[in-house]
Amino acid sequence: MNTATLAATLLVGLTRLITGVRAQWIDRTPPVPGIQRVYFANHASHLDTLVIWSSLPPPLRRQTSPVAAMDYWNRPGPRRWLAVSVLHAILIERGTGGARESLRHLIAALDEGRSLILFPEGSRGDGEHIGELRAGLYHIARERPDVELTPVFLENLSRILPKGEYLPVPLIATTRFGRPIRLEPNEERQVFLERARQTLLALGGRA
Amino acid sequence: MNVTWDHEILLLLGGILALLVVASVTGWWLAQRLRSETGRAVIANFNARTKSWWIMTAVFVAAMATGGIGSVLLFALLSFVALRELITLTPTHRADHRTLFWAFFVFLPVQYLLVYDGWYGLFAIFIPVYAFLFIPARSALAGDTQDFLARTAKIQWGLMIAVYCVSHAPALLMLEIPGYAHENAKLLLFLVVVVQLSDVLQYVFGKTLGRRRIVPSVSPNKTWEGTIGGIAGASLVGALLWWSTPFGFWAALAIALTINLAGFAGGLCLSAIKRDLGVKDFGTLIEGHGGVLDRIDSLCFAAPLFFHITRYFYT
């Protein structure tokens, strides 16, 4: 076991300890590994990525890379090591400027067989509402239609570590994995993105 | 805080072991025999509960075997999980974030440090005085006045039940009882055995004889038959265990009855909280039982009474 694997195991343990995270799969059991997925989730906390990653069963976790913001994670030192070596994250530019380039990175990762964790809202919300989803999810769905788009609703993360706080309160988080959605033939971008957003809301019982 | 193992404690543990074996064999035998759909469901739940009892007993005994520190740590952990279950289900505001941080990471550990240290004077008032005054002050500093009183009360009540009340169980180890030095582990065992046995017997009597419900709107499972049978049975067992305590036979009976009545009140109050929050259980940690708070609801109310009765009359 090398340092990165050890760090990953510790990180999963620590995340479970702080958030007591419980994973709920809509069909009760986690799906089989092997199928490529993009897990897309609501975003309210810095812990979101770790919580989804930790609640995946190990075989699924090993094939999954979180998508993270370059400006925050690509700093020399432990941060980049954590993102790249431990979590196998894919770092992308935020904002519309590098959108095409970012998409290319994500497609390349999918073509290498990775699954992705994506927060299509782009930035963290207040935990109550889900903002409009960015176009990346639509482009992935169009470019790689065989990839399963699995909605994940994160519950309580905005209470555990809300935006603007740096100390967590150890409440119990829940990750609820829903049934995958796919892009319908001829479905408009806005229609698809709104449908994806509604899926998340319904999963959280907020629709 | 020193705990020694004498033949009495081994006898108590042997009794628990025998009880678990009987429960497991009975459950296995009934699972073979019963055919009806509802009967099988009840037995499946019974067997899940028995299995969890084995695990809970093993953890509890292992903690006791390490002496005082193990028991204090175990109950601190139970408090932590119970408080987490309660606050997770209770709506709090964004402005309560830092207050909650204090509750989990300052008040809870300090309370158990006071137990370990045996500092009775501060242990008895730390949460009801200092934490209770600090909580509204910290929340007020955060500036959100909406539902202020209710929010404050929720956090205070959570600390009271999950931390303050529970901490009285390991606090039994700090009592200095003449002629009973280093034997306090048996008091803790007495409390846990009597209260949990009362729960088990109320469940068994309730399932077999239960007809008339006491407060259906609060707890559909609590019946007069089950409650009286369970409390009477567990109190009798408590009296018959008098030899392991500093109490005489009749005192042991009276004390066991008192803590069982308190335990009943605890179960009822926590059921009322669950109904209010719209949930069936506080959690899912213990298979067949629900959350930690579902398992220790009676203990929450029984432990402080047991502690103070023992302290007042026997030290």
Image (cartoon, helix red, strand yellow):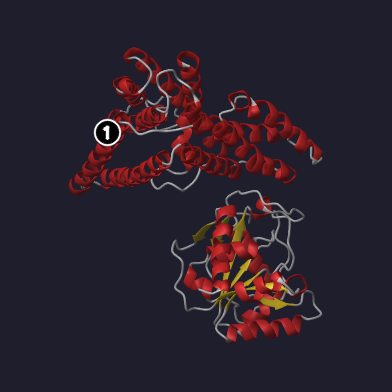
Q: Is residue A198 left or right of residue B240?
A: right
Classify residue B208 by image quadrant. Answer: top left
Q: Is residue A167 left or right of residue B288?
A: right
Image location of residue B276, percent across then percent down = 56, 35
At horizontal 36% and vertical 44% (from top left) the residue drawn is: B58
Q: Quadrant of the C terminus of chain A?
A: bottom right
Q: Is residue A114 left or right of residue B130?
A: left
Q: Is residue A143 above or below residue B3?
A: below
Residue placed under numbered mark 1 in the picture: B15
Chain under label 1? B
At horizontal 54% and vertical 29% (from top left) the residue drawn is: B165
In this view, the residue in front, B24 or A22, is B24
Name the secondary structure under disc 1. Answer: helix
Image location of residue B273, percent across then percent down = 55, 34
Q: Is residue B162 above or below residue B245?
A: below
Q: Amino acid at mark 1?
A: Gly
The answer to whether any part of residue A186 appears in the image is no
In this rendering, the count of numbered labels is 1
In this view, the residue in front, A124 or B260, is B260
Within 10 Å of disc 1 (Cα), the crowding (few <14, some 14-19, many 20+) is: few
At horizontal 65% and vertical 60% (from top left) the residue drawn is: A47
Image location of residue A179, percent across then percent down = 52, 67
In this view, the residue in front, B14 or A67, is B14
The answer to whether any part of residue B80 appears in the image is yes
Classify residue B131 by image quadrant. Answer: top right
Image location of residue B314, percent across then percent down = 45, 15
Q: Is residue A202 above or below residue A32?
A: above
